[in-house]
Image: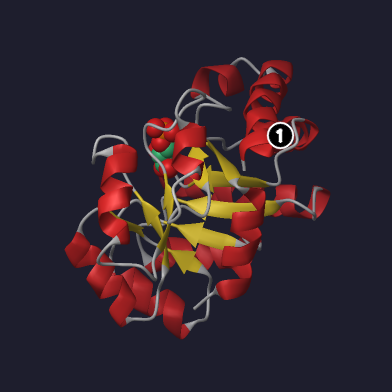
Amino acid sequence: MFEKAAEKIKNAKIIPVAKIQEKKDAIELARAITNGGMKAVEITFRTNDGETGLEKIAGCIESIKKEFPHILVGAGTVINANLAQKAQNAGADFLVSPGFNPKTVKWCVEHEISFFPGVCTPGEIEQAIEVGLNFLKLFPAEVMGGTKFLKSLAGPFPQTVFIPTGGINAENFSSYLSCKNVGAVGGSWMCPENLIKEKKWQEIENLCKKANFPCIKNC
Ligand code: 3PG
């Protein structure tokens, strides 16, 4: 299910994960990311400003999509159907969540919204397979055992492809990408919160370029 979006994510290979809620900053961030050679971005629904903050985040997704239509824009931390609806209205290309919430999954499947929920146990993977989902976020990847965990999952779940996130960084991302059951990796290491706060767009661009270059060589 959701093969088209999954293929695009596999093609992008690396998804910078960002916490941002000001539209102007979102545009600058997207510019830095594209200049850095990235083809996708995930904007997380994470805010200390309640509903107003969530609306602003949806506005960021919408603005990036309008200004940079060629980038794949994902909505992250989609922990309920209400956020899934917001992400869809904003024009997100795909949705991800940290965990496997059967209610959100059901809602997205019924509404044909490309959703790649997070899993971190074989039981959750089985539940995903049961509803036809074979492309899943793996979170938190590194503390769950990283590439060793992924290799163990390849045996019982040969049909499942993962997007590991959580603890992925400049040093370990290419080892994740070399796992046969990894379609792409996600992480905030290219656009950490402090650089966004300080509007250090050039540094973000450089971090993306650094991640992009070895990937092109190795993948
Ligand atoms: C996510 O939501 O995917 C993670 O918070 C990203 O994890 P990281 O900050 O460890 O990269």
Q: Is residue 85 above or below residue 27?
A: below
> In terms of secondary structure, where does tag 1 sit?
helix
Q: Residues within 10 Å of mark 1 (few under 14, many from 20)?
A: many
Write down the quadrant of residue 96 in the picture. Answer: bottom left
**Which one is in front, 112 or 124?**
124
Q: Nearer the viewer, residue 83 or 191?
A: 191
Looking at the picture, which amino acid does disc 1 mark?
Ile
> How is the structure coloured here?
secondary structure
Label 1 sits on residue: 33
Q: Is residue 116 above or below residue 144?
A: below
Viewer-nearest residue: 126 or 110 = 126
The residue drawn where x is 41% and y is 50% is: 77
Residue 141: x %, y % from top left: 33, 42
Q: Is residue 113 visible?
A: yes
| Residue closest to the eye, 141 or 180 | 180
How many marks the image carries: the answer is 1
Instruction: Please tell me whether residue 107 is drawn above or below residue 15 in the rendered image.
Output: below
Q: Residue at x 68, y 34 (%)?
A: 217
Q: Residue 89's spot in the image, x, y percent?
A: 61, 67
Tell me where residue 9 appears, x and y as whole percent: 60, 56
Give ligand 1's quarter of the image: top left
Which quadrant, please, contains the C terminus?
top right
Residue drawn at (35%, 70%) of the image = 104
Residue 134 x/y as whole percent: 41, 71
Res 49 visible: no
